[in-house]
Amino acid sequence: MIYDDGQGVPPDRRRALDYFRAAAAAGEAEGFFNVGAAYVGAHGVKRDYTEGLAWLILAAQRGAGGDTVTTVRARIQKLRHPEWITAAEARAPAIARELAAAPPASFLPALAEDSAFPAPKPETIAPTALPKTTTPPALDLPVLSPPQITPATL
């Protein structure tokens, strides 16, 4: 949603769509819904009611989206393209198979060098050598006894 809304980063709906797809591949109902909404609303992609409805059908099967499927079906009927509904119903199981065939991370976008969240440079993640020491010095700490709990202290 950070990329979709542009919260602290420049809005990038195409990148947001990739993250929504990865979330859907991981089984997140909202991921399915957001991809469907992107296609229906032309957010980061060309409007495609068939593809959008297919994703929304999958979202609804997972409990997300409320009556959105009904609303989109009505819109398609109003546009006089009932064949889009038939195609979406056939496309939904194919999407589910595509997502199941690949790990969720494979849907994530590659981080660009100019990304708002750049990948760490290799030198910053390399372990640093610790100085060799002998036995650490003993700490002179007082020994504390546990508090005594009696019925009067409860």
Image: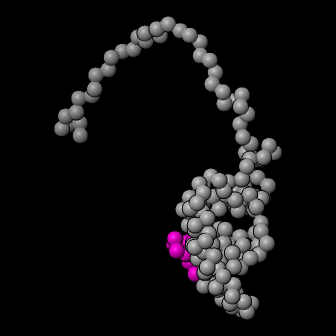
Compared across the picture, whether 141 is left or right of 64 comes to left
- Front position in the image: 109 or 67: 109
**Up/down of 10 relative to 143, above or below:** below
Relative image position of residue 109 (x, y in whole percent): 71, 53
Q: Quadrant of the N terminus?
A: bottom right
- Front position in the image: 138 or 30: 30
Residue range in magenta is 59-67
Q: Quadrant of residue 11?
A: bottom right
Q: Residue at x 76, y 72 (%)?
A: 42
Q: How many marks?
A: 0
Q: Residue at x 71, y 79 (%)?
A: 49
**Up/down of 73 relative to 47, above or below:** below
Q: Residue at x 58, y 68 (%)?
A: 96
**Up/down of 10 relative to 73, above or below:** above
Question: Magenta stretch: residue 39 in it?
Answer: no
Relative image position of residue 134 (x, y in whole percent): 50, 7
Question: Magenta stretch: residue 62 in it?
Answer: yes
Q: Farthest residue in the right direction? A: 114
Q: Residue at x 59, y 54 (%)?
A: 103
- The way the protein has been coloured in the rendering is one colour
Relative image position of residue 35 (x, y in whole percent): 67, 68
Relative image position of residue 72 (x, y in whole percent): 66, 83
**From where the camera sits, is residue 56 visible?**
no
